[in-house]
Image: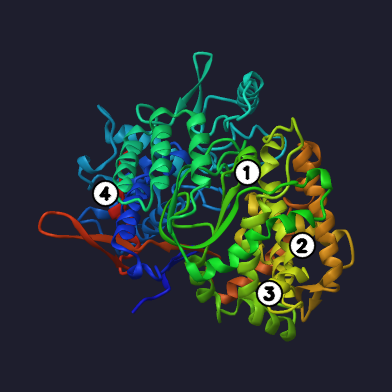
Amino acid sequence: MFSYSDERFADLQLLRYQLPGFEQLSLRQKQYIYALSQATLFGRDITFDQFGAYNLRIRKLLEAIYITEGIDHHTEDFLALEIYLKRIWFSNGIYHHYGSEKFQPGFSQSYLEEVLQQVPLNLLPLGKGESLEDLCREIFPVIFDPKVAPKRVNKNDGEDLVQTSACHFYQNVSQQEAEAFYQHQKDEYQGEEPPSFGLNSTLIKQDGRMYEDVWRIGGRYSAAIEKIVYWLEQAKEYAENEHQVRVIDLLVNYYRTGDLQCFNAYCKEWVSEHEGRVDFVNGFIEVYGDPLGLKGSWEGIVEYKDLEATKRTQTISTNAQWFEDHSPVDPRFRKKHVKGVTANAICAAMLGGDEYPSTAIGINLPNADWIRAEYGSKSITISNITDAYNKAAHGNGFKEEFVIDEYTLAFIEQYGDICDDLHTDLHECLGHGSGQLLPGTDPDALKAYGNTIEEARADLFGLYYIADTKLVELGLTPNEEAYKSQYYTYIMNGLLTQLIRIQPGNQIEEAHMRNRALIAHWCHENGNAISVVKQNGKTYVKINDYQALRRLFATLLAEIQRIKSEGDYEAARQLVERYAVNVDPVVHQEILDRYQRLNLAPYKGFINPKLTPERNAVGEIIDIHVDYSEGYAEQMLRYSTEYGTLI
């Protein structure tokens, strides 16, 4: 029997997602998915290294202990080490996947020294001529000293964000030097199709010279990229059409050369391919893991269209021009002609890199604003992932604890899932693709605040339109009142319940959390639509006027779009720092106490299904079988063995 819930540890719960309709796909489509899935899984070590210089060595050292026979698996120290390793697997490194703070081990340094003596040296990640003592001398401070490389991504205003972040995108470089290096590249560029400067390289300063170590075959991460390319080449044999073959050829060329103009060519071809049912994302894509918002973390996802749910997203995308024309932003910032907006609901078939085990529920690409403006964008909402989330959430007591009254709770139970999915659709399908930069505006002008502002822009677009009667007319919402479920849960999350994801004393760091806090706190401060009230000693959100709240969303959307369109860095900084960063410690502790009593895990992630090819006597693939039974540790150890390429 299929189970949605699986393993739980620390603040995490692992879920499983199904592949509905997979058996009805053609053999060629299954073969295509399998080859693309292999290419997706071979990027795993890249993400680990990008997220911290010591992540791979620490992971491999702990895995060696975990699999060594004779070590007692029942001591408190070993059980603490096991949890620490499982957290590392989940976060692609030693830093929390959401908060970016370094994990503190629950075992002692003396215990680690003791058990390492029992591990065969050939299992340890030792360099040439390196002893176990050398390895420990390098690794132990990173594991045990909370002052050494304490945060993967630091966004504290006024600090050197590069030198205080442990992500592995820069070496011996200051924030000022990095910003000047890439500003010089932009100033020197004379073409009309600018590359995403810095997207696929490590910026290094050595002997006083700055240079980029490019992520490509023959360069950094070559061993992993060679495997990715091999499986992309295999996938071409099973592609559904010639357009998909051209897409893969361009991606392979980019991986071989590292040339960002090749990446532009790939993006333009990829965004125009719509005929196939199977699609994928593979590469250095999102820049949230870089404090400067330049470097792309490696990620992969293989997908196939959910044909029924896609009817909803395509209804949205075919009306994209109407939404753009009726947006409450200044007409100067609207697109006069919306191009190439396509939207599909899809089923994820394999997750990898920065999309695994924790994944997005929607994606809108490419990220380059000029490509979106000239060639359009592809948006996806991942229906089998949201289905797994929804099933895990129902009946767990969370909404009953934090929603203000029975009437509102019943409303959310009736319309919440529908409106959650619809808000995601609007966010991804239209929000990210809406609006335009004014001529001459640097797309990176907002610097460290760019990601938060962009997510707020897309969320506000969705919030504004989910209450529009146009959605009832299009058959997307069942009535003119359903949107209230989304308004309530969104504001409740932004003001209160997302605080469960923050450790006491910490500020809000993650871009999506900052976005939600910005919107909720700004609306709370700038009108009477929202109240924060006490009932029976507990804090709740109360929506006083839903239409007034919609007007506030419209006002803030207009300002956020202006900031992005004009590249107004100072306005972005003031908005984020005032509304999106700070946490009320009293309210925070109350929310943490209430949540703890529910005995829930605040973060969810996924175990991938295992895809196994069935071959005939001459080795040809005649079917792909899906297995949902693989355990979390079993999968992670298998991935380290079968897809480990670096070190």
**Distance CA(mark 4)–CA(mark 1):** 39 Å
Q: Are marks 4 and 1 in contact (CB under 8 Å)?
A: no
**Distance CA(mark 1)–CA(mark 3):** 28 Å
The disc label shown at residue 547, or none: none
x 53%, y 24%: residue:
172
**Tag 3's secondary structure?**
loop
- Tell me the residue that label 4 is attached to: 641
Q: Quadrant of residue 608?
A: bottom left
x then y, percent, for residue 482: 72, 77
**Tag 2's secondary structure?**
helix
x then y, percent, for residue 308: 51, 71
Vertical side of 478 occupied by 511: above or below: above
Q: Quadrant of residue 568?
A: top right
- Tell me the residue that label 2 is attached to: 464
Mark nearest the camera among 1 and 2 is 1
**Type of amino acid at the residue the image marks with label 4:** Thr
Q: Is residue 500 visible?
A: no
Q: Are marks 2 and 4 in contact (CB under 8 Å)?
A: no
Which quadrant: the C terminus?
Answer: top left
Vertical side of 174 occupied by 105: above or below: below
**Distance CA(mark 3)–CA(mark 4):** 47 Å
**Tag 4's secondary structure?**
helix
Q: Are marks 2 and 3 in contact (CB under 8 Å)?
A: no
**Tag 1's secondary structure?**
helix
- Tell me the residue that label 3 is attached to: 477
Q: Earlier in the sequence, mark 4 or mark 1?
A: 1
- Tell me the residue that label 1 is attached to: 372
Q: Earlier in the sequence, mark 2 or mark 4?
A: 2
Q: Earlier in the sequence, mark 1 or mark 3?
A: 1
